[in-house]
């Protein structure tokens, strides 16, 4: 009887651990003419949010997050083309990339050095 109880406890613990590891599934919701997407990391934290056109092209603002939920990038698309200002955060550095015709037009970087911010301009 003791062995049966130990086996039952072990099975319940394994089942409980597996249930906690369930990851969220990416969601795609039709919103007018667009499809709103929310993508997740394996740990269940949001990875990216943004929109697709009905033809599957990226459009509007897309935001990326790391596995801890911190914003790492914002991007702009127009019917699949890279446009406007994109921003990338990495520790104490902010990089701004300007796109024109899906090509990089300019790159600016700011670094936080304690009480001052240094730019590459």
Image (tube, rainbow, N blue to C red):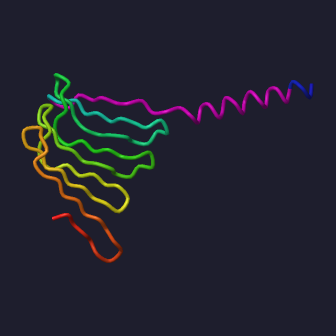
Q: Residue furthest bottom?
A: 115
Q: Residue furthest right?
A: 1
Q: Is residue 5 above or below residue 94?
A: above
Q: Residue at x 16, y 22 (%)?
A: 55
- Location of the N terminus by quadrant is top right
Q: Residue furthest top?
A: 55
Q: Is residue 66 above or below residue 115?
A: above
Q: Please state which of residues 76 and 45 is positioned toward the viewer in this rendering.
A: 76
In the rendered image, residue 16 lying in the magenta stretch gets the answer: yes
- The percent position of residue 6, horizontal first and vertical second, equals 85, 30
- The percent position of residue 104, horizontal first and vertical second, equals 13, 44
Q: Residue at x 37, y 40 (%)?
A: 47
Q: How many marks?
A: 0
Where on the picture, by quarter, is residue 12? top right
- Location of the C terminus by quadrant is bottom left
In the rendered image, residue 104 lying in the magenta stretch gets the answer: no
Q: Please state which of residues 65 and 114 is positioned toward the viewer in this rendering.
A: 114
Q: Please state which of residues 115 and 9 is positioned toward the viewer in this rendering.
A: 115
Answer with left or right where residue 114 lies relative to residue 60.
right
The span picked out in magenta is 5-32
Q: Residue at x 20, y 49 (%)?
A: 86
């Amino acid at each position: 009887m003791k062995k049966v109880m130990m086996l039952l406890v072990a099975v319940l613990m394994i089942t409980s651990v597996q249930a906690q590891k369930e990851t969220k599934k990416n969601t795609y919701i039709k919103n007018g003419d667009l499809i709103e997407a929310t993508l997740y990391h394996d740990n269940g934290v949001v990875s990216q949010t943004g929109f697709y056109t009905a033809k599957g092209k990226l459009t509007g603002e897309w935001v990326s997050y790391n596995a801890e939920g911190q914003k790492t990038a914002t991007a702009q698309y127009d019917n699949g083309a890279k446009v406007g200002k994109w921003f990338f955060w990495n520790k104490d550095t902010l990089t701004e990339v300007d796109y024109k015709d899906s090509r990089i037009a300019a790159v600016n970087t700011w670094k936080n050095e304690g009480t001052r911010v240094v730019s590459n301009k």
